[in-house]
Image: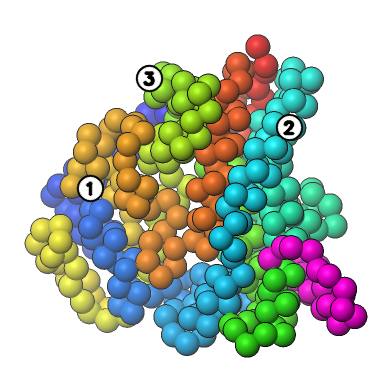
Amino acid sequence: MSLKQSLIRCLLGLMRGIAPVVHYKNDVFVMRHADVVEVLKRDQDFTIAPINEANIARHLGTFLLGMDAGATLDNEQKAMRSVVDRADQARIRTFVREMSQELIEEAKAKGRFNLVRDFTRLVPLRMIADYFGTPGHNEDQMLRWNRLIFWDIFLNFKDDESWRKEALEASAGLNAYLLELIASRKSVLSIGSRLPNDLVSRLVSAQQGDGPSLDDDGIRRNLAGALLGAEEPISKVCINVLEILLSKPKAMKMAKAAAANDDVEAVGRITFDALRYNPSNPVILRHSEKETLIGPKSGKKRKIKAGKKVYAVTYSAMFDRRAFDHPKEIRNDRPLDHYLHFGYGLHTCYGSYINYVAIPEMMTAILKQNMRPVGKLTREAGFPDVWEWEML
């Protein structure tokens, strides 16, 4: 945990107390937990399309994270959720547990390995390949596509054209691959053959029924969006949490004890609590559609003018004493619905049901091992890339 992060948390704490809603030029920063939740819940007043739609459409066409409330979003959310089966979490848990053990055994054989490239990226990549049915042409290409597209949509704040060019090439490749995959599944279905049990097949099969469904382009758009939120982000969460636990011996001891007892639920609770110290999404952006008031649940009402970019600072909100007792402690008993790691309200991450299973399983597999980092973590495009560890 860096001095810079500590100073930022101190500053955010002061702002929660004396200036919980800050106006700066055309931006508004919202600091308290109740206010952040209010912004994310009031999807008619604080919209997402002006923030995300153009960037997403440039690459994939609009999917759920670029749509405001309305009939189109409602239909597409229903279609995507209708193909999720009650047994899917158990399937994901089993796959992640087995794949984690396989990769840990490979790491033991090497002795020294890159925790990111050899583990935290590969587990979600292979889980998604199995569960979504989207393995890509090869693993390296699929990872590269997702990282470039995600970066340009959500992190290219300076409009870097060199990165954008690569990202556009990546999205063209991903779009073509997904359309070919959808067509191949429809061809199999047309001759009466059995499709594999994955999300692509379920979405294609749904086109033949009376329930909610998507056309081919709708399947492509929403699968691409789901891929962006499920591969690199899971890796990033695991690495961020490990960085925090390494800086907090008491919390690390608690986490390793839970892992040693195969208490995956406790490991998950510790993981998501520690993630508050370095969240993968420290800020969620919205657009104020009209002049409005927020704040009755957190104190004095405050005005937000129309046309502002609203920064819902989840990093600050998850250290708010009004929502988290003893917020500086890392604990294993906080309710999961207090966290804002995967958003809140209408645009809660579609894959959160995956994250709440996969991440604790991966963290349990890591924490059970006797190993240590032997080099510094390096990142690419905002995501972890290289972190050498050795088995002891």
For mark 3, what is the residue?
250
Residue 355 horizontal side relative to residue 114, left or right? left
Percent x, y of residue 7:
31, 35
The magenta-colored residue range is 171-199
The residue drawn where x is 49% and y is 61% is 349
Report crowding for label 1: few under 14, some 14 to 19, many 20 or more residues within 10 A (C-alpha).
some
Q: Nearer the viewer, residue 101 or 374?
A: 101
372 relative to 46 in the view: left or right? right
Against 183, residue 114 (above or below) is above
Mark 1 or mark 2: which comes first in sequence?
Answer: 2
Task: Name the amino acid, label 3.
Answer: Lys
Q: CA distance from mark 2 to mark 3?
A: 27 Å
Secondary structure of residue under mark 1: loop
Secondary structure beneath dot 2 equals helix
**Residue 323's disc number:** 1
Q: Residue furthest right?
A: 191
Residue at x 15%, y 61% (from the top left corner) = 297
Q: Which residue carries the number 2 mark?
A: 103
Is any atom of residue 179 visible in this view? yes
How far apart, in angstroms, are the residues tagged by discs 3 and 1? 23 Å
Query: Which percent across, then down, holds residue 392?
Result: 65, 11
